[in-house]
Image (tube, rainbow, N blue to C red):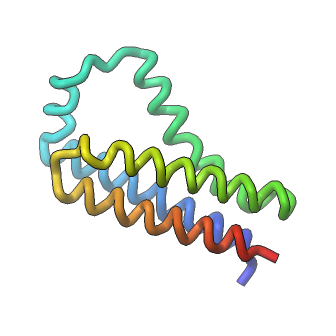
Amino acid sequence: MDARIILSATWVVVMLIYLLGDVLRIYSGDMVKMQADTNFTQAIWFVAAVLMLLPILMVFLSLVLPQPAGRWANIIMAGFFILFNLAGLPTYPSFYDKFLLVVSMVFNGVTIWYAWNWV
């Protein structure tokens, strides 16, 4: 199968994992607790929007970027999200959040592996 499709699919999976975590946080009441503990300003919401837009853009960019640029964009972005999620992992109190973040990091690792081996 074409590496572009696999890479695009890994970003879809990662984005769906993030969305699942958000939905579970809302239904469990954890989102209300997080908002009570943090002063969410417009700047914080903007940064959150940019961060969550990046995997969505990678779905598209994985399909259209030329191979060398696509390879490095996937490796850099997936590596960034692994580091970002590792740093944030201790801040999530719920087991389901930690589990979903670890699964997303595994898929980021799969993204790096496929991008690195893309010929």
- Residue 114 sits in quarter: bottom right
**Residue 60 horizontal/vertical position (percent):** 69, 54
- The residue positioned 64% from the left and 47% from the top of the image is 57
Q: Is residue 115 left or right of residue 9?
A: right
- Residue 116 sits in quarter: bottom right
* Quarter placement of the C terminus: bottom right
**Residue 80 horizontal/vertical position (percent):** 55, 48
Q: Is residue 59 left or right of residue 13?
A: right
Q: Is residue 71 left or right of residue 76?
A: right
- The residue positioned 35% from the left and 62% from the top of the image is 102
Using the image, determine if residue 65 lies above or below residue 30.
below
Using the image, determine if residue 116 lies above or below residue 36.
below
**Residue 95 horizontal/vertical position (percent):** 17, 57
- Residue 50 sits in quarter: top right
* Quarter placement of the N terminus: bottom right
**Residue 47 horizontal/vertical position (percent):** 49, 27
- The residue positioned 48% from the left and 24% from the top of the image is 46
Numbered circles on residues, count: 0
Q: Is residue 41 left or right of residue 28?
A: right
- The residue positioned 47% from the left and 49% from the top of the image is 83
In the image, 2 versus 27, the foreground residue is 2
